[in-house]
Image (cartoon, grey):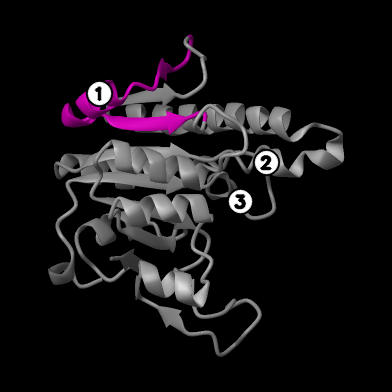
Amino acid sequence: MDSSSSKPIHRLLLKVSGEGFSKEGETALDTDRVSALAEQLRILTSEGVQVATVIGGGNILRGAQSAHLGITRSTGDYMGMLATVINGLALSDSLESNGVPTRVMSAIDVHKVCEPFIRRRAIRHMEKGRVVVLVGGLGSPYFTTDTTAAQRGAELECDALFKATMVDGVYDKDPNQHDDAVFLPKLSFDEVLDKQYRVMDMTAFALCRENDLPIVVFNMGDSSAVVRAVRGDKVGTRIQN
């Protein structure tokens, strides 16, 4: 991205899917991937960037996919929220082992391993240089981690929402099915709506649009993408008003 077209990022909300914590086709935690992400966050905090990260749990369980197990959607979603706690604790431990202070904050009550999410406390942790690892979704079923990320990004007054995915960014069509798919490095919120590009669920997208929260979609497989994007390099797709 052209750094001249966007304000510097001092406070970042990073959304990481659960799939990004495991090898392709597997469900177990991939410690190498967790460590690689922790290293990027260590670099950012050493440069004075305040970081909060929303963690998914899809590598362990997706609530929406639990119906075939005979589990109701609400119960499945709560199980998915608990899965995010497992991933969040793994990231926290990796960060702490590299000298980065963290606080794991949960929207559901698991007080023996996490603090409850309290907005002002989360902001204070970031101001003190701690990485805030947000788990437990929003604490209610039927909301995705995309929506959690948008909600937390807005209420924590972040400068941007970075969405780590398994693709390079946004294309005009599915690059896995179309050889002529065109990569789109920069889009407006209106363009995404007009062209119906799939960036995130519509509730999350609306929250970002209404709160003027830029979105950067990038490939988590790039071991330096987060750091380079924050520094203003052209990484992934940037969406803003």
Nearer the viewer's eye, disc 3 or disc 1?
1
Residue 124 is inside the magenta segment: yes
Nearer the viewer's eye, disc 2 or disc 3?
2
Q: Position of residue 62 (x, y in %)?
A: 67, 41
Q: Position of residue 46 (x, y in %)?
A: 17, 40
SS at circle 1: helix
SS at circle 3: loop
Check residue 214 in the rendering and tell me which mark sits there, or answer none. none
- Residue range (magenta): 112-136
Q: Amino acid at mark 1?
A: Arg
Residue in front for this viewpoint, 217 or 146: 146
Relative to residue 102, is residue 155 depicted above or below? Answer: below
Task: Read off the residue under disc 1.
Answer: 120
Task: Read off the residue under disc 2.
Answer: 62
SS at circle 2: loop
Left or right: residue 191 versus residue 137 is left
* Residue 224 visible to an observer of this rendering: no
Labels 2 and 3: the sequence-earlier one: 3
Quadrant position of residue 154: top left
